[in-house]
Amino acid sequence: MPSIPLRLQEAVRALAAGGVVACPTEAVWGLSCDPDNPDAVERLLALKQRPVSKGVILVASSTDQVAALLEGLSEAQRSKLALSWPGPTTWLIPHRGLVPPWIHGGRDSVAVRVTAHPAMAALCTAWNGPLVSTSANRTGCQAPRSAFQVQRYFGAELDALVPGAVGGAARPSVIRDLLTDQIIRT
């Protein structure tokens, strides 16, 4: 990984080893891990004190990284996604058994976002795939907008921290259901 910055290389190594890393996103700092590693996801959820039944978001740097999930969608559905990605909109998309239950939380859909945030996009690009992304706070606590807050919450419990600042969004990503257009979170 010689062409990417050292801190990003450290984060990718931590992810590959099953670690949990913090990274700025569009509105708040997030925690990320390898979505295919059940132990990493379990550790991330334990840090957050979040039940697996809530599911987590998969964030990617491009639609290519989530192409398998987009297969079978209608042109109208793909157009909806294209109008909001990359950007701060998370869509609930039918997963058709392509993602493990520790990601979708036992639901028929999975939350997916293609990020426009440079640090998160760089991490997904360096990882070469989507990552779990969930706010970097314990359940019930305020979502952090600074690296200092992330350090206060988790300190040495994190395996890496990707440098950067959150984007300009005032709130975490909107979550919408692709099939119904229902807004789940504003």
Image: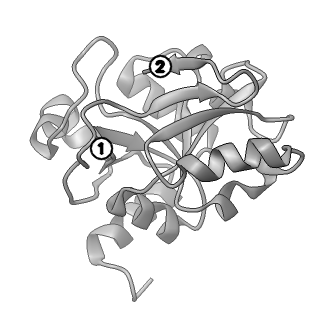
- Label 1, secondary structure: give it: loop
Mark identifier at residue 116: none
Mark identifier at residue 185: 2
Q: Residues within 10 Å of mark 2 (few under 14, many from 20)?
A: few
Where residue 7 appears, x then y in whole percent? 27, 69
Q: Is residue 36 visible?
A: no
At 38% from the left and 40% from the top, the residue drawn is: 31
In the rendered view, does 120 fall on the left or right side of 6? right
Q: Which label's residue is closer to the chain start, 2 or 1?
A: 1
In the rendered view, does 178 fall on the left or right side of 76? left
Q: Nearer the viewer, residue 180 or 96?
A: 180
Q: Is residue 96 visible?
A: yes
> In which image quadrant can residue 88 be found?
top left
- Give the vertical position of 83 relative to 103 (above or below): below
Mark identifier at residue 158: 1
At 42% from the left and 34% from the top, the residue drawn is: 173
Q: Residue furthest right?
A: 72
Q: Quadrant of the N terminus?
A: bottom left
Q: Nearer the viewer, residue 57 or 85?
A: 85
Where residue 74 appears, x then y in whole percent? 86, 44
Where residue 151 appears, x then y in whole percent? 15, 39
- Give the vertical position of 148 relative to 179 (above or below): below
- In whole angstroms, how far apart are the C-alphas of marks 2 and 1? 27 Å
At 36% from the left and 56% from the top, the residue drawn is: 117
Q: Nearer the viewer, residue 14 or 137?
A: 137
| Callout 2 amino acid | Arg
Q: Quadrant of the C terminus?
A: top left
- Give the vertical position of 99 relative to 64 (above or below): above
In the rendered view, does 10 fall on the left or right side of 45? left
| Callout 1 amino acid | Leu
In the rendered view, does 73 fall on the left or right side of 47? right
